[in-house]
Image: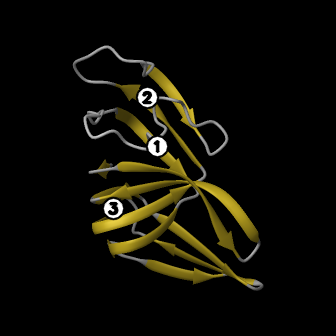
């Protein structure tokens, strides 16, 4: 679950393999079930996994970068251009209703969109404090 999430647009991020376009989100905190992190350095791959059936948490403001977000969109309490139902959002397919307004007008109201069952794919995390129950580290 993501708490206090704000979509910050599509950004280009430099990686060891080149550049990637990713979705950028800032979050107040999040919870992730059965978290599994992988880091590749040269020929080695490090796997850091939370204990089975546990929930990892990250507090403080953090930034998440993701290749894709999939879930079911809902807009509580009003009719808008946001579709109700399954959405797939990637850097090449950001829906108009999610695009940040540029420039943001002073009188523009914030829109609350709930995405249930959200899954972020291939995330990168910066900032925040990650707590992972019963961590297990392996190298292949």
Q: Position of residue 90 (x, y in %)?
A: 61, 42
What's the residue at 61%, 52% (across, down)? 67
Give how far apart the Cα atoms at labels 2 and 3 are: 24 Å
- Secondary structure beneath disc 3? loop
Answer with mark 2 or mark 3, whichever residue precedes in sequence.
3
Report the mark closest to the observer, 2 or 3. 2
Judged from this view, the residue extending furthest toward the top is 79
Position of the C terminus, as image quadrant, is bottom right
Residue 54's tag is 3
Tell me the crowding category of disc 2: few under 14, some 14 to 19, or many 20 or more residues within 10 angstroms, Cα based. some
The dot on residue 102 is 1
- Describe residue 40's horizontal placement relative to residue 98 as left or right: right
Q: Which residue is mark 2?
A: 72
Residue drawn at x 41%, y 64% as measured from the top left: 63
Distance between the alpha carbons at the discs numbered 1 and 2: 26 Å
Q: Residue furthest left?
A: 77
Question: Which of the marked residues, 1 or 2, is nearer the chain's N terminus?
Answer: 2
Colour setup of the view: secondary structure
x and y percent of residue 12 in the render?
64, 61
């Amino acid at each position: 679950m993501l708490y206090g999430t704000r979509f910050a647009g599509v950004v280009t991020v430099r990686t060891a393999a080149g550049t990637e376009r990713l979705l950028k989100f800032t979050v107040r905190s999040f919870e992730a079930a059965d978290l599994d992190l992988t880091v590749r350095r040269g020929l080695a791959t490090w796997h850091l996994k939370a204990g089975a059936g546990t929930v990892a948490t990250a507090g403080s403001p953090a930034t998440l970068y993701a290749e894709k977000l999939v879930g079911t969109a809902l807009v509580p309490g009003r009719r808008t251009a946001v579709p109700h139902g399954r959405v797939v959002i990637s850097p090449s397919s950001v829906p108009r209703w999610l695009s940040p307004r540029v420039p943001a007008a002073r009188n523009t109201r914030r829109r609350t969109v709930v995405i249930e069952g959200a899954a972020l794919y291939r995330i990168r995390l910066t900032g925040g404090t990650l707590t992972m129950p019963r961590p297990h580290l392996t190298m292949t």
